[in-house]
Amino acid sequence: MGKLSPRHAVVDSNMCVACGTCADVCPTGAMEIVSGVFAKPIEEKCVGCGICAKECPASAIRVEVRS
Ligand code: SF4
Ligand code: SF4
C-alpha cells in the first residue's frame, strides 16, 4: 500500500460547478467528476500540489493537511 501525501485537495461540493478543469489540470489524474455533478479527489492519487485549487474557476478547492 502506498503512503499518502501529507496534504490533499478537498472539494466543496456545494460550490463546484462540475466544469472539469481540475480533472484536466491534475498531473496525477486524481480528480474525478462524480455523476457529472461535483468533483472528488481520489485520495490515493492526490499529492496535494494545489494546481487544481489555483485553476478552479469556482474557488471550490482547498488544499489541507490530511487528518
Ligand atoms: S475546477 Fe472547480 S468547479 Fe470545476 S469541476 Fe473542479 S472543483 Fe468543480
Ligand atoms: S492537489 Fe494536485 S494532485 Fe491533488 S487533485 Fe489537485 S491537482 Fe491533483
Image (cartoon, rainbow, N blue to C red):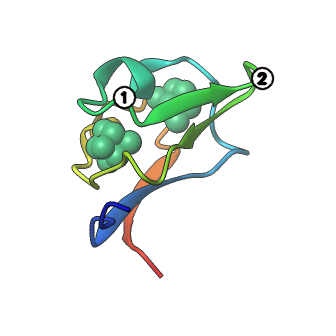
Disc 2: CA contacts within 10 A as few (<14), some (14-19) or many (>=20):
few
What SS does tag 1 mark? loop
**Which residue lies at the image location 28% right of the left edge and 72% below the top edge?**
6
Quadrant of residue 66 within the rendered picture: bottom left
Which mark is nearer the camera, 1 or 2?
Answer: 1
**Which residue lies at the image location 42% right of the left edge and 52% below the top edge?**
44
Give the x, y percent position of residue 33.
Answer: 62, 26
Give the x, y percent position of residue 22.
Answer: 41, 28
Residue 35: mark in rendering = 2
Up/down of 37 relative to 65, above or below = above
Disc 1 to disc 2, C-alpha distance: 17 Å
Up/down of 58 relative to 43, above or below = above
Q: Label 1 amino acid? A: Gly
**Which residue lies at the image location 29% right of the left edge and 23% below the top edge?**
25
Quadrant of residue 45 within the rendered picture: top left
Q: Label 2 amino acid? A: Ser
Please tell me how many numbered marks the rendered image carries: 2
Q: From the viewer's perspective, is 34 left or right of 41?
A: right
What SS does tag 2 mark? loop
Instruction: Give the camera-side residue of 60 and 46.
Output: 46
Give the x, y percent position of residue 35.
Answer: 78, 23
Give the x, y percent position of residue 14.
Answer: 73, 45
Residue 29: mark in rendering = 1
Q: Quadrant of the N terminus?
A: bottom left
